Image (cartoon, rainbow, N blue to C red):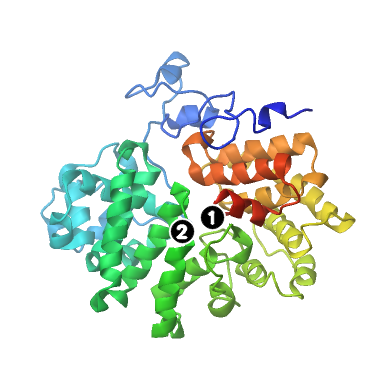
Amino acid sequence: MRLSFLRPSAIFCHCNIPMQSRGVRTRTGCWTCRKRRKKCDEKRPYCTNCAALSLRCAGYTIRLRWTEPQQTPKALVKDDPQVRTLPAGSCKDASDTEEPNDRRREAILLYHLRQDGYKSLTDTERGIIYDFIQWGAATLIPGIGTTREKYFEIFAQSKGLLASCLAYHTTLSPKYSGLEDQYYQRSIEVFRRELSDPLFVANEATVYAALMLSSISMNRGVPWTVHVNGIASILDQQKSYACPDGRIKDYTSFMGILDLPTHILGRKTINRNIWYTHCRLRDGIDVVTGLPCSLIDLLSAINQPYVVPMLMNWRIEEGTKKQQQIWDANRHAAIIVGLNPGSIGQGVNTHVRQAVTLLRELKGEISDEFSQVRQALLFPLVITGSQSLSLSDDDKLFIMECISDLADGSLEHNLYYCGAGQILQELWYNDAGRSLQQIAEDLGIEQGLF
């Protein structure tokens, strides 16, 4: 099967990725149409498809799948005096209503932001932050459902963090399209002011602001490790890693993930070895990547000569079948990185074929935006794609379709996944003996594989 339509001569927009013939997938249709994978006209209160087929239209409300049982907004704000003045039943769960009651929204925002933070925002900004609290934060911290207070209480400590949350959520929701540049620039300006203030530089909210800026920059397709390295330097100087408990442990883990040497192409800053130095030997599953911490330990040490044998002998931890498949796909990808990826041997080819087989079995998980394994797919897709001599044209088509699906069928509007696809296409059709890292550097792309 020829892939002529994937070649750089057949491009769209600015990123050399083919437009998908099936059209752009959206996340705004009713839940019944989304489950049936049908186009929805989004008519309220019931869409035309469901009405015509006499189906129960499940509505359009946001649904979150937390890694732990979800704590309701009512439980979160029950001790706040602003909430006690509300009539009974006004703090229903977010899934019970499409639009928040104004007084309910105000109560939740006052609880988290306090009076000063709340008054500093315009009504539009209050809407953005409310949406961020309700669902945007879960794209960063999947397990935040039962720990909202633990994280959101620091909003009141930093205007920089609040500005970063505003900027981050505008990159997620088409509802706020057109505001991204404005809030991104503002978040950088506020963050720099706080970073130069001795009262704020040691504040944990400043650390989270830096991590938010890294995520925002990643989504915008611009260099982002400078924010990770900047805050890591400050934490090193202050010896903040000495007590890895609570939120310090949480943000150290997040920084360690964003610093993994296996997961960054075209890096413009030095690797800080944060996970290798401060996070190894932890138990359980990392909530950001969905990978076992024991596997991340090996990823963080990928340049050590003992790692490839350990990866080959790594025992897959207990989990669902899909989890174990994605973990194994990541293991094979890590072995490919650990071996000499510039040369193709029988050993590398074996791991490529096994990874491709696992990824094909997981293809259906990509369309499920709540899948537990979706967040760990890009790394094995790109690393497997880097071994072009071991791939058929059909394999390349499959990999590009998967990356497009991760971007919800809209690569031209998703610079993060667009960058990954652009690097692979350059490798497949114009590599000139270059590696993935060299191609990313030549293209000026700092690409995360998270």
- Say which of 54 and 321 sits in front: 321
Residue 405, by quadrant, is top right
Q: Is residue 32 found left or right of 21 in the rendered image?
A: left
Q: Earlier in the sequence, mark 1 or mark 2?
A: 2
Q: Residues within 10 Å of mark 1 (few under 14, many from 20)?
A: many
Residue 108 lies, in percent from the top left, at 22, 54
Q: CA distance from mark 1 to mark 2?
A: 7 Å
Q: Residues within 10 Å of mark 2 (few under 14, many from 20)?
A: many
Per the image, label 2 sits on a secondary structure element best described as loop
- Say which of 266 and 30 sits in front: 266
What residue does disc 2 label? 224
| Quadrant, the N terminus | top right
Task: Verify CB contact (< 8 Å) between mark 1 and mark 2.
Answer: yes
Residue 55 lies, in percent from the top left, at 46, 22
* Number of the label disc, if any, that sits on residue 446: 1
Q: Is residue 370 found left or right of 98 in the rendered image?
A: right
- At label 1, which amino acid type do we have? Glu
- Relative to 82, say whether 23 is above or below: above
Residue 80 lies, in percent from the top left, at 17, 62
- At label 2, which amino acid type do we have? Trp
Q: Is residue 103 visible?
A: yes
Q: Residue at x 36, y 37 (%)?
A: 174
Per the image, label 1 sits on a secondary structure element best described as loop
- Relative to 316, say whether 186 is above or below: above
Q: Residue at x 31, y 69 (%)?
A: 205
Q: Residue at x 58, y 48 (%)?
A: 443
